[in-house]
Amino acid sequence: MKYLKVFLFLCALAISGNAFAETYYVNTEVLNLRSCEGTDCKILGKLTSGESVELLEDKGEWVKVQTDKGEGFVIKRSLTTQSYGSSIGEVIFSIILIVIIAWIALFFYLLPSKIAANNKNANKIYRVNLFLGWIPIIWLILFVAALIGESREE
């Protein structure tokens, strides 16, 4: 039992070392992951723009990081806290999705005006819908008024 407690304590200590690590992102095209602090140290690997790293230790100009490629040192000025990971496809998809949602919202927002197009009070319903239709209770009243309103006699 005594050894189990020691083992669990050591496991918790090992896990907690990375629990407070901060995530940073590479903000240069290519960044060398080095074995020690300095440009004369061995290059362990190369990191690319947008790749995430966990900051383990801050040593001023250089920082010790953990990456998918292992542990090493990089120059601090080449890291940022903001991710630039969105691809052009994700951005285009997001824009298209926003436009579609906006058109659907606009359709429902102006629905009472469209329904009331042949009513006697179509002009009034349109104006109120345009300026106050964003208030849910007013939109509902306009919707009901458009449905039950008298049609124009032509």
Image (spheres, grey):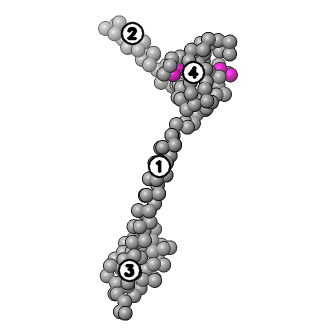
Q: What's the mark number on residue 116?
A: 3
Kindly indicate whether the residue at mark 1 contacts the one at mark 3 (C-beta within 8 angstroms): no
Q: In 3D space, how far apart are the residues under numbered discs 3 and 1 (Cα atoms)?
A: 34 Å
Query: Element type at marker 2?
Result: helix
Residue underneath mark 4: 46
Q: Viewer-nearest of labels 1 and 2?
A: 1
Q: In 3D space, how far apart are the residues under numbered discs 4 and 3 (Cα atoms)?
A: 65 Å
Residue underneath mark 1: 94
| Residue at x 40% of width, y 81% of height | 117
**Dot 2 surroundings within 10 Å: few (below 14), some, or many (20 or more)?**
few
**Pointer 2 or 3: first along the chain:** 2
Q: Is residue 28 left or right of residue 70?
A: right
In the rendered structure, which segment of residues is drawn in magenta? 61-67
Task: Kindly identify the amino acid type of the residue bearing the numbered disc 3.
Answer: Ala
Residue underneath mark 2: 6
Task: Kindly identify the amino acid type of the residue bearing the numbered disc 2.
Answer: Val
